[in-house]
Amino acid sequence: MNDYKVKSKRYTKGMKTLLNDWMIAFLFIALFALCCLNSDFRTTTNIMNVLRQASFVAIIAMGEFFVILIGEMDMSISSTIGMVSIFFAGFTVNMGLPIWLSFLLVVLIAIVVGVVNGCLVVYGKMPSFIATLVIMNMLKGINYIYSDGLPISGLSDEFGQMALGKLGIVPYAVILMIVVAVILNVFTAHTAIGRSFFAVGGNKEASRLSGLNVNFIAILAFVMCAILTTIGALGLTSKTLSGNVTLGDNLLFDVMTICVLGGTSLTGGRGRVFGIVIGALFLQVISNIMVLMGINTYWQWVVKGIILVVVVLIDSFSKKE
């Protein structure tokens, strides 16, 4: 009888873990099936458009994923997106630099931003919310000083292929998202450094006592966030072929929602890379079907807010249990 109870508890715990880990996948399948009842939604063109729209935001969210995984938060990504966009366009259009060199320069600038964010949190002992909020405002000021608040247009059609190009019917953006997700999944699941993010987020003190360089892992999380934000920002810039300081102004909330939707715990230590991809698709499908139904854009903000509140409450109650 005791053996039966033990097996029953293990089975129940296993089912709860499965539901917690893959709930968003089950909900996405149900949502997608429901949306397919709409004839405009289920067209190949529209579905590919949904995938394309979700791709670059998903890559940015994968960057935020690493910061949240260690129990911190990067609020500067919106200004980092604007910085990458406007400086890349400035280097390429105004200064006439090759695309590859402009890319390297904005990546280096983003790495500096990530290191500064990490050092303020690790060595300055500042709460990550405050530290990155300060950097966000500083970057916004720098962006406006550099551009006078005006877009920089004139990027080449070749660069635009990053967002608009296709391999068959599959957009390059979707392929890039999948490649990035696979690489990051292998990194987090099968490398010592990748697993360290989970350990640090789960228990910083225990990780330090076990010999992990907690400070290095924390700074690396902010650097990875900055690099992945750069990739996503360049993809968003390639859609309009112009740099714009306001490009990321409305994306911070979406990125945070995607991370939480994807199963990343806001207190750190738990999450999956592919959960981020599913979370991005889930949010984009909702936005898309609301547009197709002619629902006002402002209602999309309300719905996204409700979704975030519900998911955070579920995450909170699951921890108490």
Image (cartoon, rainbow, N blue to C red):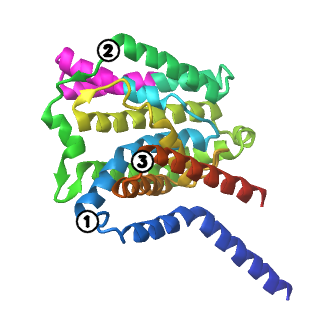
Mark 2: few/some/many CA within 10 Å (<14, 14-19, 20+): some
Q: Which residues are magenta?
A: 84-112
Figure quadrant of the C terminus: bottom right
Residue sitting at x 20%, y 15%: 94
Q: Can you say whether 176 is above or below 159 in the image? A: below
Vertical arrangement, residue 196 with respect to residue 78, above or below: below
List the residue tagged with mark 3.
Answer: 296
Q: Which residue is mark 2?
A: 147
Q: Give the residue pinned by disc 1.
A: 43
Magenta span main SS: helix
The residues bearing labels 1 and 3 have C-alpha atoms spaced at a distance of 22 Å
Estimate the spatial distance between the alpha carbons at disc 3 and disc 2, rounded to whole Å. Answer: 32 Å
Residue located at (21% from left, 22% from top): 92
**Residue 95 percent across, percent down from the top left:** 20, 14
Q: Helix, strand, or loop for circle 3?
A: loop
Going by the numbered disc 3, the residue's amino acid type is Asn
